[in-house]
Image (cartoon, rainbow, N blue to C red):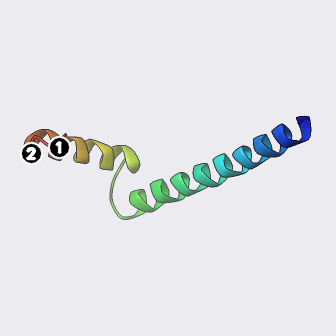
Amino acid sequence: MQNTLEQKIAYLEFVNDQLHSEIHYVDRLLKLIGFPDGLETIKSAAQEVIEEEGVE
């Protein structure tokens, strides 16, 4: 059982690393194409659209 838990933890750590790398890459790309704060800029813009259009 301990081995199974260790395998699950190792897999989750791997997935976390992959997701972190992907988010960092997308953030860097957004900054390169002109969004000054990368993902934060996109999130703010999306929130404004949602609020203006009343989307939930």
The residue positioned 33% from the left and 60% from the top of the image is 34
Residue 5 or 48: which is nearer the viewer?
Answer: 5
Q: Is residue 45 left or right of residue 21?
A: left
Residue at horizontal 32 percent and vertical 44 percent from the top: 43
Q: Residue at x 35, y 50 (%)?
A: 36
Which residue is labeled 2 in the image?
Answer: 53
Viewer-side residue, 16 vs 35: 16
In the rendered image, which residue does mark 1 sit on?
50
Decide which of 31, 4 is in the foreground and name it: 4
Residue 40 x/y as whole percent = 37, 43
Near mark 2 (Cα within 10 A), the count class, few <14, some 14-19 or many ≥20, is few
The x and y percentages for residue 31 are 41, 56
Left or right side of 51 for 38: right
Q: Is residue 21 left or right of residue 2?
A: left
Please name the amino acid that badge 2 sits on: Glu
Give the residue at the far front of this rendering. 1
Task: Tell me the CA gap for discs 2 and 1.
Answer: 5 Å
Question: Which residue appears farthest toward the top when viewing the image?
Answer: 2
Question: Which amino acid type corresponds to the residue marked 1 in the rendered image?
Answer: Ile
